[in-house]
Amino acid sequence: NGRTWRRSAAASGLTGGSALGRDSIWAVGGKTAAHWNGHAWSRTSLARVLPRDTEFCRPSADQVLARSANDVWAVGAGHCQDERGPFYLLHFNGSRWRLVDQSARYGEPLQVVPDGSGGLWIPAVAGFPGTFAMLHYSRGHLRPAVLPLPATRLAVGAVTHVAGTGVTFGGGASFRPGQRGTRQSAVILRYAG
């Protein structure tokens, strides 16, 4: 409220959030999408949009980006044993959620941020200890971005877009193949589209 934090029982289980303003906040977690209208949370089930749970997979929506009341994006993963993926991309058009894309090739998305041109940047990690991919969704297509280092030598954990520009920054680490936990070097990536 601008002075103190207060716990909301209605927001239980939500893992990612994005605010359009103080009276419009979107959040997701598990098979739930929720919207704060400034007074209360309303929750929507994503169970019909995401695949069903299986013995080894627990699909969920994990991160969200709200661009307007009728343009909300969510990313999630199957959280399958030993895989992290498959990757899921969902969209809310103001009236309903739908599954836009899914891929077993890409694992767990870490974020979803705008690219400044109507598209999305989505850093993701597949498998264990993890192979990194920077995904770009634009004009209905999901593609891996070309990076300055191969995925076996790079991990980017945070991405942010500079509002009003085509510039996006990513921060992470580079390392020797097979030595992710040792001899890392900090990396800052800049994309100017």
Image: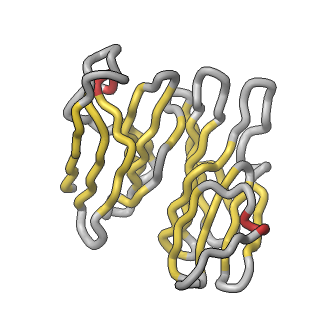
Q: Which quadrant would residue 55 be assigned to in this image?
A: top right
Q: Position of residue 3 (x, y in %)?
A: 55, 84
- Name the outermost residue toward the top: 178
174 left or right, relative to 90: left
Number of marks: 0
Quadrant assignment for the N terminus: bottom right
Query: Residue at position x 27%, y 56% from top?
Result: 168
Q: Is residue 88 above or below residue 85?
A: below
Pick the residue in front: 29 or 78. 29
Q: Is residue 82 above or below residue 123?
A: above
Q: Position of residue 97 (x, y in %)?
A: 67, 59
Quadrant assignment for the C terminus: bottom left
Query: Residue at position x 62%, y 54% from top?
Result: 15
102 left or right, relative to 97: left
How was the colour assigned to the protein in this rendering? secondary structure
Query: Residue at position x 41%, y 43% from top?
Result: 123
Q: Position of residue 31 (x, y in %)?
A: 74, 50
Pick the residue in front: 20 or 142. 20
Query: Residue at position x 61%, y 75% from top?
Result: 5
Q: Is residue 100 above or below residue 102?
A: below
Q: Which quadrant would residue 150 be assigned to in this image?
A: top left
28 left or right, relative to 121: right
Q: Is residue 126 above or below residue 14?
A: above
Q: Position of residue 125 (x, y in %)?
A: 46, 33
